[in-house]
Each structure stands twice: as structure tokens, then as C-alpha cells.
Image (cartoon, rainbow, N blue to C red):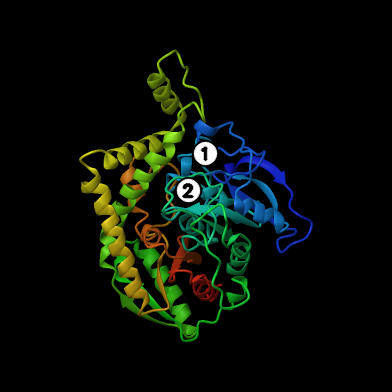
Amino acid sequence: MSANIFITEDRIEGDEDGPLADTTVAVKDNISTEGVRTTCGSAMLEEYVPPYDATVVSRLKDAGATIVGKANMDEFGMGTTNETSNFGAVDNPAAPGRVPGGSSGGSAAAVAAGEADVALGSDTGGSIRCPAAFCGVVGIKPTYGLVSRYGLVAYANSLEQIGPFANTVEDAAALLDVIAGSDERDATTREPQLEGESYADAATGDVDGLTIGVPTELLEGADEDVVETFWDAIADLEDKGAEYHEVSLPSVEHAVEAYYVIAMSEASSNLARFDGVRYGNSGGYDGNWNEAFSEARKEGFGDEVKRRILLGTYALSAGYHDKYYKKAQDARAWVKQDFDEALSEADVLASPTMPVPPFELGESLEDPLQMYLADANTVPVNLADLPAISVPAGETDGLPVGLQLIGPAFGEERIIQAASALE
């Protein structure tokens, strides 16, 4: 098993014909696959086998894709480095000895290592874009509602989206073409509003006349070499006819704290179902259900998941709901308003995907706050329900650097077109 990329290696054959015939796909292990173990990287679901396929998996099969395994991930999607998995960390194929990014690190690593042609991940606060940047591949976080979440094991319902990884923008867009669209099982979904025939057709590389807004706040505090690589990529886009100007997103100063209050609150609610009765280990029931419940969760959840459940429960508790959760929702509305204003003055917004190069394995495990702050450039996009893509921008000291392009709601074609100009 190369670099610990897969939790379960299994072959799920799709239809003989279709747009993804002869294409291999790695699927993140929080996306349900009928008859194939789906663990969410957790001891709690170590032996769980879903009785149904997620909508995106059904669409992969219908498109002729062959699923080659369930990709390793941070436990229940909670992490930035792919080191909180119960099944061990993934090594970064593009930078051995470094983390692949999280939480969809196994999916990005599968593409980077050639273990799969394309892959599916999920992005709650950057969990597709971060590993795409760290592994030197392309990752798309779609607009909230473009891709069905039916069959995705929930972490934070109002924030997360399933999206594609690939080695090229066109291949990622072609996978998005297959999984996008409304689903009667997910009431938040809608059909794509395409200007052309498909998302893949948008990967023309033509950026002549494109206006790029660069939020100054998303460059502050970033590694100097990362910023230099970012500006080199912007200069490349300028050479191809794009123009850039600086914009301001003052609300992003509070985006990380707002995001973690909302995400942890939703996680504490969603993960309440893992009680040792319906899912997971029993906890050794001896007549006291509360003790059995506590023991099951103590044994089944790792430290990071426990931390987020506790913080989320606290934020939702009586007397603190208005002080924390309501304020975080107010901040979310402010973030969305700032993005709408910035995008009224630019076709796309651009920033480094991650403010730092990939961490060394083990470097951030003792400092959760460092891990949370590393999401500063990605979490605002989820709060605003917007689409974003991470595309390789170059390297610093041999380590991959990603450039993030953000578009208006359901403006995937625009970011795909801009990103393809960097290839």
C-alpha cells in the first residue's frame, strides 16, 4: 500500500460505456460505497459497511469509472494534515516526509502518486484545496448545492461539499461534469447553470481581459516564498492578458474563529448518532446506558474529534448559544457580503491556497491552533458558499505551492477557465 494512501483497497467496476470509461477513481472514505467498508478514518466506524451508494458514487458507476479504493483521511474530516486518521498518516508523494494536507489527503495523494487517475474528496473548510496545494495537483471545491451530499457522512452540513481532484484542470472539470446536478435525495442541490456545453469545455486557458482581485488580507502573514511564488503566477496570468488589482475583505480577520464555532457546533450535533447503539462499538453495556455511551465514544473517537465535539457542545449550550454560535453566524453573513462586493469588481479573486508549504510529518500535532490558523485562506470561501479551485503555481525549496481562484456562486466555469491558463 503506497504511502498509506488507501484505508480499503477494493475494485468497484462501473458501466462499460460512459465519459469516465477506463478512468480509475479514488473515493474519500467518508463517502458511502455499497458493500465496501467506509470508516471516515475512525475507530468508531472501523468495520462499518454501508448498504447503499452515495449519489456521487452512483454517478461515477453510471459514467463508467472504476473505483480502486477508499482513500485515507483525517478522522471524520477533522484536520488539516491527514494525521488524525485512526489508520495512520499519509506520506506526501510530492514531498516525502511531509504531510499531504487534509482532510482529503489520501485522495490528493492517490492522484499525485498515480494510484488513481482522478479522485473525490470533501471540503468543509479547505479539505480539497489544502491537499491539492500540498500534493501539487488540481482540486475543485464546488459552490454549495452543486453536488449532492447524499451518502456523505456529515461533519458540518452547512459548509461541506464533495469535489474532484485530478492532475489537470480539464480532468478535474470532467469529473465535476459527472457528479454535479440536482438530486431528489438532497434538497439543497440544483442543476448547473452552464454557459457552454460542459465544465471541461471551459478549460480553454483564455484569460484575455480577465480581471483578478487580490485580497490583501489573504497575503498577510503568509510565508515569504509562498507569496513570491503566488506573484509569479499572477504575472504569468498578466502575460496572457489578465489584469489584477487589490481588493479588501476586512471580515476575513474573523473568518477562522467563526468557521470553527459553526463547524464544531454542527459536528457535535452530527456525531451524536455515534453512540455505540446504532453505530460503533457497544462500550460494554452493563445496565448503565450513560456509562456505555461514554465508553463507546471514548474508545471510538480520537483526540481531535473529541476536542471539536466538546467545543461545539459548549458553543451550543444554554447561556452561550447567543454569545458564540449566533455571533459566528453574523460573522458568516459579513464574510459573504464582503465576497459579493469584491466579486462585483473582479471576475475572480486570487490568493495562495495555503499560507505555508507542506508541514513536516508530526510538526503540527502538538499545536492544534497552528493547524486551525493554516486554514485562513480557505475557510472564508466555505462560509460564503462560493466555488474555488486550487491549481499548482510552482514550488518553493522543492515543495508544491498552490494558487487559489475564487468565483461567484455557480461560477465554476470562470475559475476553471482562469486556472487552466496556469497549466
User: Residue 228 at x, y = what percent?
Assistant: 38, 69
Q: Residue at 53% across / 52% down in the picture?
A: 149
Mark 2, Cα crowd under 10 Å, few <14 / some 14-19 / many 20+, is many
Q: Residue furthest right?
A: 16
Q: Please name the residue that numbered disc 2 is placed on.
A: 103
Q: In the image, is 94 to the left or to the right of 303? A: right
Residue 65 can be seen in this image: no
Q: Quadrant of residue 251?
A: bottom left
Mark 1, Cα crowd under 10 Å, few <14 / some 14-19 / many 20+, is many
Residue 348 vertical placement versus 316 (above, below) = below
Inter-mark Cα distance, 2 to 1: 10 Å
Q: Please name the residue that numbered disc 1 is placed on.
A: 41
- Element carrying mark 2: loop
User: Residue 373 at x, y = what percent?
Assistant: 32, 52
Looking at the rendered structure, the kind of residue marked 2 is Ser
Q: Residue at 51% across / 25% down in the picture?
A: 281
- Element carrying mark 1: loop
Residue 280 vertical placement versus 58 (above, below) = above
